[in-house]
Image: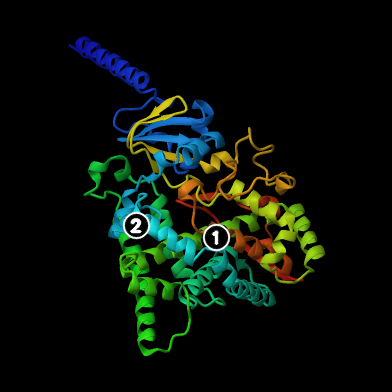
């Protein structure tokens, strides 16, 4: 009897293998590891999927086909194929593969990040491009960015007077939050001179972590009603808190407008005017959901990137000294940097690019989806396949970058490579029609904030930690945060 069972089992396995091989030949699927029953290739992901998937690419090539539970997934890990996905065949991959967590509060139905390419998405992008991130609007708000960065420097000065370490991530988070809130609402959402933003930062971080957390429902959709890990339930709580805050700000503004004692013309005013005269373009709920996208996506990514930049500079002292030398020669030590100064600071710009290369804010670009079967570089990507672009892997591709694991801003010294979505070796903001709409603000604010911190202070690591011993471990979410917060003591120039 055992012999018969063994024979039947072997026969079943043989037919299964033949079927899989036949399917792969028929569909010309991309190469990938053999899938186990039920779980497919889930066991390969680990707790840092961007690293695990980069390792798989070394074995199977720059395009890898995986079966993650019930979901077919293709991972792209080369700049050439990323260009195919996001530029040459952008329309075929323009839809999003929406994770279950974004169904919390039906946020995916309103979010410019997750909406499909439709009339509502186009309207929201037009509003953002025209009224928030256009060159004219950013020029008009430069004084706000200058003021908020000055407050960051003042906060560091206060810490230096008493010899206290600055939590770089938390301090830059407050700056990013208040910059955005002043642009949107003409007010601070937190005290720039205290740690009052701690709870809000944790709330935003929780949102980003839940979005990036591996969720069984995304791999086995039949579990949707159960929500076995409680991810959608927790996300509903977090989003509700953020939406309540946005709703309170809208109520406050509506009351001010009724009383006629509000003179500011900010983004909220612009959107309320559009809602009043062209309600089909945006209503109150859509407005509040847009604010959630802007606040959540714009604060965590900026503060994480600034923290990584400071960590790399404190770990690589020769790079820090070279940056400070440039600042001293061009700006003068101790001075705040203006946005116009950045054009005269090529080494600072190289540091910014190198930070984006080695620490991209979103290591696996927000997943796209094939709406139909797509012929792609000799392979078939089947309908409903999730497509991931591993920007982290591209930034550390030894075929593109010499000494790819080293933090070397000099690699960009005579390079024309930029982060605006045309050079696919460096696409931290994505590319194509789905490129991050906040890119124009980020590339203005980031070098000014970083340069001002470097030019106003010398820095030493808290606790007497040697530069070579600085912990550079990552925590994986939809964004990459530093596992151990960077604590550094500012020493005024």
Name the residue at 38% across, 84% down.
Answer: 257
Badge 1, how many Cα within 10 Å: few under 14, some, many 20+? many
Label drawn at residue 120: 2
Of 57 and 265, nearer the camera is: 265
Give the foreground label among 2 and 1. Answer: 2
Q: x, y percentage for residue 3?
A: 22, 10
| Position of 220 relative to 256 (above/below) | above
Report the residue that reaches farthest toward the left. Answer: 1
Marks 2 and 1 sit apart, C-alpha to C-alpha, by: 27 Å
217 to the left or right of 417: left
Q: For the N terminus, which image quadrant? A: top left
Badge 2, how many Cα within 10 Å: few under 14, some, many 20+? some
Q: x, y percentage for residue 475?
A: 50, 51
Residue identifier under label 1: 302
Of 235 and 109, nearer the camera is: 109
In the rendered image, is residue 29 in sight?
Answer: yes
In the rendered image, is residue 315 in sight?
Answer: no
Q: For the C terminus, which image quadrant? A: bottom right
8 to the left or right of 260: left
């Amino acid at each position: 009897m055992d012999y018969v069972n063994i024979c039947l089992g072997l026969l079943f396995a043989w037919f299964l293998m033949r079927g899989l091989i036949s399917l792969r030949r028929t569909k010309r699927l991309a190469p990938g590891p053999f899938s186990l029953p039920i779980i497919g290739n889930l066991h390969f992901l680990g707790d840092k999927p961007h690293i695990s998937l980069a390792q798989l690419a070394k074995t199977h090539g720059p395009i890898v086909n995986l079966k993650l539970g019930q979901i077919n997934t293709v991972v792209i890990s080369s700049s050439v194929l990323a260009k195919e996905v996001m530029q040459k065949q952008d329309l075929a991959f323009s839809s999003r593969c929406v994770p279950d967590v974004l169904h919390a509060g039906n946020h995916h139905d309103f979010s410019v990040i997750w909406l499909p390419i439709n009339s509502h998405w186009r309207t929201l992008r037009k509003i953002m491009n025209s009224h928030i991130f256009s060159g004219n609007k950013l020029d008009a708000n430069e004084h706000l960015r200058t003021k908020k960065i000055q407050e960051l420097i003042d906060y560091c000065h206060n810490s230096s007077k008493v010899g206290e370490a600055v939590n770089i991530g938390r301090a830059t988070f407050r700056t990013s939050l208040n910059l955005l809130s002043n642009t949107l609402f003409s007010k601070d959402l937190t005290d720039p001179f205290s740690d009052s933003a701690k709870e809000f930062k944790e709330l935003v971080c929780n949102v980003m972590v839940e979005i990036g957390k591996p969720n069984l429902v995304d791999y086995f959709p039949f579990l949707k009603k159960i929500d076995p890990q409680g991810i959608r339930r927790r996300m509903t709580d977090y989003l509700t808190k953020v939406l309540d805050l946005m709703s309170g700000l809208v109520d406050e503004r509506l009351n001010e407008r009724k009383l006629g004692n509000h003179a500011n013309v900010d983004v909220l005013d612009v959107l309320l005017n559009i809602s009043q005269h062209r309600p089909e373009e945006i209503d109150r709920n859509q407005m509040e959901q847009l604010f959630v996208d802007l606040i959540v996506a714009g604060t965590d990514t900026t503060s994480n990137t600034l923290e990584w930049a400071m960590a790399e500079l404190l770990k690589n002292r020769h790079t820090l000294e070279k940056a400070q030398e440039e600042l001293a020669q061009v700006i003068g030590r101790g001075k705040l940097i203006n946005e116009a100064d950045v054009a005269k600071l090529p080494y600072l710009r190289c540091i910014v690019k190198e930070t984006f290369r080695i620490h991209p804010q979103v290591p696996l670009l927000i997943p796209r989806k094939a709406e139909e079967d797509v012929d792609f570089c000799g392979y078939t990507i089947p309908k409903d396949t999730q497509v991931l672009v591993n920007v982290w892997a591209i930034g550390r591709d030894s075929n593109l970058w010499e000494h790819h694991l080293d933090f070397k801003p000099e690699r960009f010294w005579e390079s024309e490579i930029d982060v605006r979505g045309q050079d696919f070796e460096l696409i931290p903001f994505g590319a194509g029609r789905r490129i991050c709409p906040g890119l124009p603000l980020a590339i203005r604010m980031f070098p000014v904030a970083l340069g001002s911190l470097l030019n106003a202070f010398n820095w030493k690591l808290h606790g007497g930690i040697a530069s070579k011993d600085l912990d550079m471990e990552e925590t994986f979410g939809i964004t990459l945060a530093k596992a151990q917060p960077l604590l550094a003591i500012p020493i005024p120039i």
